[in-house]
C-alpha cells in the first residue's frame, strides 16, 4: 500500500515538474518575442549587422524587465534563456554569419534598447 502511494506521489511530482518546465518555456518565448518586437530592427547593410553576444546581452537586459509587476519580473528572470536556447530561438527567425570576430545577425539594436 505504501509503495503504491509513494509511486503515485513521485508520478504527480514528475507531472508537476513537466508542467512547470512547459510554462517556463512559454514565459521564455514570450520574453524573446517581446524583445524582438521592441528592441531590434533589420539591418540594411552588412556593416550594420550586430554581433550575437551584443544581441544576447540586450535580450538578457530586456528579459529581466519583462512582466507587468514585480512577481512576473521575478519569474521572467528564472526563465531566462541560456545562450544556446537563445541561439536556437534566433535560428527560427534569422540567419547568422560567421566573421573573424564572431557570429553576426542581420539586425541592429534600436536606439535605447
Image (tube, helix red, strand yellow):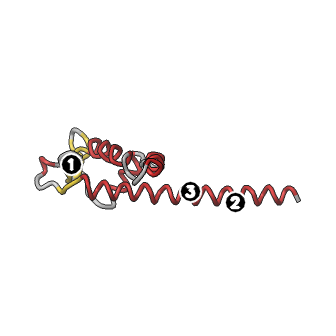
Kind of element beneath mark 1: strand
Is residue 84 left or right of 99 when viewed as pictured? right
Mark linked to residue 59: none
**Residue appearing at x 20%, y 53% in the figure:** 106
List x then y, in percent, for residue 3: 84, 56
Image side of residue 42 versus residue 90, left or right: left
Name of the residue lying farthest toward the top: 101
Determine which quarter of the picture holds residue 12.
bottom right
Q: Secondary structure at mark 3?
A: helix
Q: Position of residue 5 (x, y in %)?
A: 81, 58
Considering depth in this image, is 90 or 40 the residue closer to the camera?
40
Q: Mark 3: few, some, or many residues within 10 Å (few <14, many ≥20)? A: few
| Nearer-the-camera pick, 61 or 15 | 61
The answer to whether 79 appears left or right of 108 in the picture is: right
In the image, is residue 54 above or below residue 25?
above
User: Percent position (x, y) of residue 99?
Assistant: 21, 43
Cβ atoms under marks 1 and 2 closer than 8 Å: no
Where is residue 42? Give x, y as percent: 18, 57
Which residue position is annotated with label 1?
Answer: 109
The residue at the point 33 percent across, 61 percent down is 92
Q: CA distance from mark 3 to mark 2?
A: 12 Å
The mark nearer the N terminus, 1 or 2, is 2
Residue indicated by mark 2:
12
Closer to us: 97 or 66:
66
| Residue at image coords 29%, 42% | 53
* Numbered badge on residue 20: 3
Task: Sort mark 1 into few (<14), some (14-19) or many (20+) by Cα contacts within 10 Å.
Answer: some
- Could you tell me which quadrant the N terminus lies in? bottom right
Amino acid at each position: 500500500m505504501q509503495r503504491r502511494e509513494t509511486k503515485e506521489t513521485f508520478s504527480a511530482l514528475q507531472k508537476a515538474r513537466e508542467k512547470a518546465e512547459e510554462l517556463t518555456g512559454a514565459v521564455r518565448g514570450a520574453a524573446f518575442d517581446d524583445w524582438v518586437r521592441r528592441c531590434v530592427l533589420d539591418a540594411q547593410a552588412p556593416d550594420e549587422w550586430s554581433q550575437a553576444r551584443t544581441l544576447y546581452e540586450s535580450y538578457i537586459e530586456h528579459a529581466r524587465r519583462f512582466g507587468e509587476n514585480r512577481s512576473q519580473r521575478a519569474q521572467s528572470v528564472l526563465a531566462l534563456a541560456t545562450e544556446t536556447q537563445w541561439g536556437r530561438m534566433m535560428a527560427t527567425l534569422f540567419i547568422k554569419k560567421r566573421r573573424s570576430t564572431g557570429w553576426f545577425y542581420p539586425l541592429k539594436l534600436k536606439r535605447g534598447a
